[in-house]
Each structure stands twice: as structure tokens, then as C-alpha cells.
Image (tube, rainbow, N blue to C red):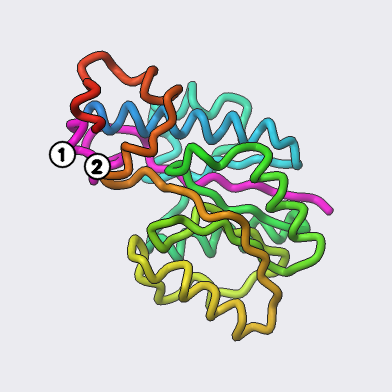
Amino acid sequence: MSTHIVILAKAPLPGLAKTRLVPALGEQGAAQLAERMLRHTLTEAAAADLGSLELCVTPDAAHPCWSDISSGVRLSEQGDGDLGRRMARAARRALAESDRVLLIGTDCPSLTRDRIKAAARALQHSESVMIPALDGGYVLLGLTAFNPSLFRDIPWSTDQVAHLTRRRVRALGWRLHELEALHDIDEPGDLAHLPAFLRARLPPEITNRQLR
């Protein structure tokens, strides 16, 4: 089976990326952490070596910030609409080219190459796979078929995302394989779960006190 991984990412720019972390890290620090996590996600997705890899970005694929980050990776734009509309476009496009798609974000440093490979394997026996986030969302959604109901009228960035997605999958009569839930890094409190290698690479002005 051919696999297409789509990483959905915001440009790691101050005031745009990881804005909920600004109270702890400041705009510059939040943007720098966003870039570190984005690069880590790209590294792990590429190392999974499952097939084609796409970085689907917002707001503008032509922004200079992508020239180095996206080197060697297919770059596309998310387009308009809420997160659901943007994910739906990416999923539909990927499944027109490949047998299965893995949609992932950049907020979960624990989404390693081995977990990505495990998600792809699960799609050999089910129509969908999910890695839930412990905050009620999900960090990966994999599909072998497309249906817009999985992305429509979902209250994104709430604790209902994974629950509603499960209900939509069941309503379609599809099998859903779930893997271990992981931590997203979205709010200041989540920084307690930031791996040591990402803490070590933060700018020196972001102190241990700020990450407690």
C-alpha cells in the first residue's frame, strides 16, 4: 500500500505560531519552539520512510521562512476555511494519489517514527487509525478512504475532537484502530511534558523557571 504523510503546520512566526504559549515563552520564544517542533516532526516523518511526504502550510507557502525548513519536501498550502476544511482538502488530495493518508500536526514531540509506522500498519486492517491527544484532540488521523463528515462541524481545539471523530467513524461503519494517547504541547502547563532535547535547544532567555 502506498502511504502519503501530510504534516499540517503554521509558519513558525512570532504572533502566529503557538500563541497559547506566549504567556510562558513570549512571542519570540513560542515561535522558536514551534520551529523546533516542526523540524522534529519532519525528521520523524521522513525517518518513518513510508512513502511521499508533504508539508501543508498556512498562511503562505511563498513566505521565506519555508525555504530552509521545507528543503526536499513537497510544499503545499492549506487554503481557506477552518481546520476541518483544510484537513479535508489535504486528505482528499492525498487519497487521490495514494492508498492511505496520515494527517499529523507539529504539536506532539512524542509522535516518533515508530509510532507513525505503527499507525500506517494499522491501516492494513482498518479504514482509519487515530492517535488521540490526552487533551481530547488527536495528534494523528490516518485514513484509507475519504468522507467529509470526519472534518465538518467539529469544535476544533476542544476536548470533544477525538470523541466526535470516533462517533463519525462508527456512523460510517468503518473500523477504527486507536494507539496510545500522547501529550500535545499547546498550553503553558503542557511544557512540563516537553522532552529534554527540545528544552535544551530553546534560546537561553527561556529559563527553567518559565518551563516549570
Q: Earlier in the sequence, mark 1 or mark 2?
A: 1
Q: Quadrant of residue 45?
A: top right
Give the side of residue 207 with respect to residue 17, left or right. left
Badge 1 density bin: few <14, some 14–19, many ≥20, Cα 10 Å: few
Q: Give residue 119's position: percent from left, percent from top.
A: 68, 53
Badge 2 density bin: few <14, some 14–19, many ≥20, Cα 10 Å: some
The answer to whether 117 is drawn above or below residue 199 in the figure is below
Q: Give residue 84's position: percent from left, percent from top.
A: 44, 65
Give the side of residue 38 with respect to residue 166, left or right. left
Q: Residue furthest right?
A: 1
Residue that label 1 marks: 23
Mark 1 residue element: helix
Residue that appears at 46% across and 34% down: 38
Q: Are marks 1 and 2 in contact (CB under 8 Å)?
A: yes
Residue span colored magenta: 1-27
Q: Give residue 147's position: percent from left, percent from top.
A: 61, 74
Tell me the number on the disc at residue 188.
Answer: 2
Q: Give residue 138's position: percent from left, percent from top.
A: 49, 58
Q: How many marks?
A: 2
Tell which of 78 and 170 is nearer to you.
Answer: 170
**Quadrant assignment for the C terminus:** top left
Check residue 2 for magenta coloring.
yes
Q: Quadrant of residue 196?
A: top left
Q: Disc 1 marks which amino acid?
A: Pro
Residue that appears at 39% across and 71% down: 160
The answer to whether 104 is drawn above or below residue 41 in the figure is below
Tell which of 172 and 81 is nearer to you.
Answer: 172
The answer to whether 57 is drawn above or below residue 212 in the figure is below
Mark 2 residue element: helix
Q: Disc 2 marks which amino acid?
A: Pro
**Quadrant assignment for the N terminus:** bottom right
